[in-house]
Image: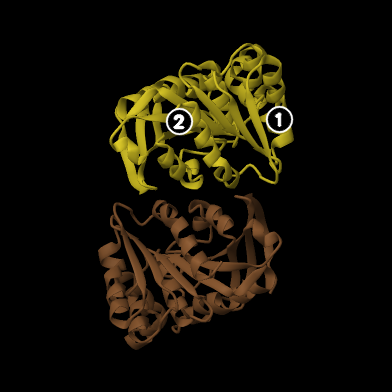
Chain colours: A yellow, B brown
Amino acid sequence: MSLIVKSKQKSFGGTQGVYTHQSASTQCEMELSVYLPEKADTEKCPVIYYLSGLTCTQENVTVKSGFQKYANEAGLIVVCPDTSPRGTDYPGENDSYDFGSGAGFYLNATQAPWSTSYRMYDYVVNELTDLINNNFPVIQEKCGIFGHSMGGHGALTIGLKNPEKFKSISAFSPIVAPSQCPWGEKAFSGYLGKDKEAWKNYDATQLIQNGHRSANNILIDQGTADDFLTEQLKPELFQQACEQHGQPLTLRMQPGYDHSYYFIASFMKDHISFHQKNLHQ
Amino acid sequence: MSLIVKSKQKSFGGTQGVYTHQSASTQCEMELSVYLPEKADTEKCPVIYYLSGLTCTQENVTVKSGFQKYANEAGLIVVCPDTSPRGTDYPGENDSYDFGSGAGFYLNATQAPWSTSYRMYDYVVNELTDLINNNFPVIQEKCGIFGHSMGGHGALTIGLKNPEKFKSISAFSPIVAPSQCPWGEKAFSGYLGKDKEAWKNYDATQLIQNGHRSANNILIDQGTADDFLTEQLKPELFQQACEQHGQPLTLRMQPGYDHSYYFIASFMKDHISFHQKNLHQ
């Protein structure tokens, strides 16, 4: 697996890179960003993966959230992949913002035609982590994951299913119960089929109910002025499951904040600090 | 003059707004962003104006630079206007990135057809400041100006010509001597005509030579890896003029940084602190 450099730019003392590579999981070229703090010039560093939300590419968080300042201060490498395969030309791939391109939902599709390349779960959990471990100075056992909205769903489900790999989990306004909201129902029906048994494997609230755990406390920030809060996000469902099943969780409702990158940027410092602490930096 | 609210979003404790209004100076609808720190809920605050570079709108700095964090901490209002009139439909208005739309150069054009609406100097100095003073809780006598590239040129020239109004000036990678670089020669020829006497009024280096001063030290940050450094920006010309004519200047060459918003974001904190100090906050 070889990485092609698209750009490298100095940012807050470190280096913000954008790369492409040919992916075996998704059968197409994938773009990602990798931020290396100054510290990575001379020693290995912990790494955190940020998964983005619907309609996003790697670029949104990379140019809008300002994570570089805090990542450089904390000595953390930050990896931001794309949200789906691109250019597969399946019928309907580009018809809606919440299914197909830009909406991979971090799962392995089982339904044709999506099952060939919509394999973002395998991509993130195995291929991307191998790629990063082989190409950047990371401390492999110090690895965390976070994300926003659909990417918060991705971070929670991937983290809970792979606690030995991702030791620290946080999320901004995540979809915590996709089996119980319109975004998740549409995506899971299309990618996984109508049988809801198959959905449980990609639903953070059900994963908690079924015994999956993170070794550390999970941090979730959620804006109270988020237009998607009551219909799509429903953090109380995850909170109830965590309380009932003994998963430590800090859910912070942030008054007046919406679903945008202004919200994410406002609390990015706290999330970077959270991962730094969990990864014993 | 009435302001129309396009959006308001909470950001770092304050409120990031985007507005439009019908401009008398530019004869069209103009868009701008205004950030209000939390402090502005209960008292008047100093204000700083940020002028953007070629191809930009108000949006680039508003979503990419992360100034909101520092502005909220400093209790400063930040106003970001657009870079030119829009939609005038003059022949050639949209033909190049460095002339016409997105490239107003913060001057009053004297050449037809541009002279009717390409009046960004009047817009910023008079109309925009009146609009802000009348609609937001600003301390009018505590006002600063800064900008990037073409907007750095705007901040230097507007600030030097109106020192009683703009008491604090800084810039990221500014065009300091537009009469002596291709960007400036093209823009000034088109907007002001071939007679270079008329150009002196909009050239920061010549303004210093002709006796214009800022009451405070001027801060300039410039990346050494900026592709435009030697052909277009030439900060040494401004530095020499300031040294010869007694204008205090801090020019910081920042190793490895380019012309992008990654560079601006990396040093935004210092610029906000600089203006806060100059405005005696």
Q: Position of residue A256 (x, y in %)?
A: 70, 46
Q: Position of residue B43 (x, y in %)?
A: 69, 65
Which residue: 70% across, 20% down?
A: A243
**Image mark count:** 2
Callout 2 secondary element: strand
Q: Which residue in the structure is indicated by mark 2? A: A48
Eyeballing the image, is B117 above or below B250?
A: below
Eyeballing the image, is A2 above or below A7?
A: above
CA distance for labels 1 and 2: 25 Å
Residue nearest the viewer, comparing A41 with A193: A41
Residue B48: which numbered mark, if any? none
Left or right: A171 in relation to A14: right
Q: Where is residue A82 in the image (x, y as percent from the top left)?
A: 46, 34
Callout 1 amino acid: Lys
Callout 2 amino acid: Ile
Q: Can residue B142 be seen here?
A: yes
Q: Position of residue A209 (x, y in %)?
A: 67, 14
Residue A234: which numbered mark, if any? 1
Q: Which residue lies furthest to the right in this view?
A: A230
Q: Do labels 1 and 2 share a chain?
A: yes
Q: Quadrant of residue B40?
A: bottom right
Q: Quadrant of residue B174?
A: bottom left
The chain carrying label 2 is A
Q: Can residue B83 be seen here?
A: no
The chain carrying label 1 is A
Q: Are discs 1 and 2 less than 8 Å apart at CB?
A: no
